[in-house]
Amino acid sequence: MKRKLMSKIIILIILSIMFALPFAIHVKGISNKKESIKVVVYPGDTLWSIAAEKNSGYRDVRQLIYEIRKINNLKSPVIYPGQELEIPIK
């Protein structure tokens, strides 16, 4: 009787882990999402000037420019006045 009960408990634990694990992975993925802000490009702005201004000081400006281009699907570093850019923060 005890052996049968123990095997049922073990099966229940294994099934609980199998069902909970994908949910835990999904929730963790959401919490790692980077935040961003939107900025409007003004005459005279460059990706470098915007990245240098919005850089929180913990990363290379070149890396931030790369991330800005990637997020905004920019094929070149050319930006235009009036254009809205999404800038990752942290």
Image (tube, rainbow, N blue to C red):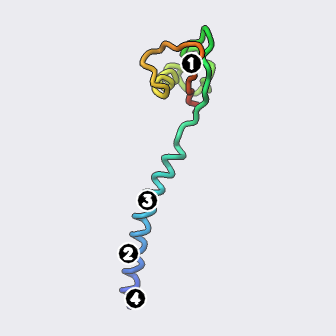
- Kindly state the secondary structure of the residue where label 2 is placed: helix
Image-based side of 54 in relation to 8, left or right: right
* Label whose residue precedes the other's in the sequence (2 or 3): 2
- Kindly state the secondary structure of the residue where label 4 is placed: helix
Height in image: 63 above or below 30?
A: above
Mark 2 to mark 3: distance in Å? 15 Å
Instruction: Please give the residue where the numbered disc 2 appears in the rendered image.
Output: 11
The quadrant where residue 38 appears: top right
Instruction: Please give the residue where the numbered disc 1 appears in the rendered image.
Output: 83
* Residue pictured at 47% horizontal, 15% vertical: 77
Height in image: 47 above or below 9?
A: above
Of the two numbered discs 2 and 4 in the rendering, the one whose residue sits closer to the viewer: 2
Mark 4 to mark 3: distance in Å? 28 Å
Instruction: Please give the residue where the numbered disc 4 appears in the rendered image.
Output: 2
Amino acid type of the residue tagged 4 in the rendering: Lys
Q: Position of residue 27 (x, y in %)?
A: 51, 52
* Residue pictured at 48% horizontal, 56% vertical: 24
* Label whose residue precedes the other's in the sequence (4 or 3): 4
Mark 2 to mark 1: distance in Å? 57 Å
Of the two numbered discs 2 and 1 in the rendering, the one whose residue sits closer to the viewer: 1
Amino acid type of the residue tagged 3 in the rendering: Leu
Image-based side of 21 in relation to 80, left or right: left
Instruction: Please give the residue where the numbered disc 3 appears in the rendered image.
Output: 21
Circle 4 crowding by C-alpha within 10 Å: few under 14, some 14–19, many from 20: few
The quadrant where residue 55 appears: top right
* Label whose residue precedes the other's in the sequence (2 or 1): 2
Of the two numbered discs 4 and 3 in the rendering, the one whose residue sits closer to the viewer: 3
Amino acid type of the residue tagged 2 in the rendering: Ile
- Kindly state the secondary structure of the residue where label 1 is placed: loop
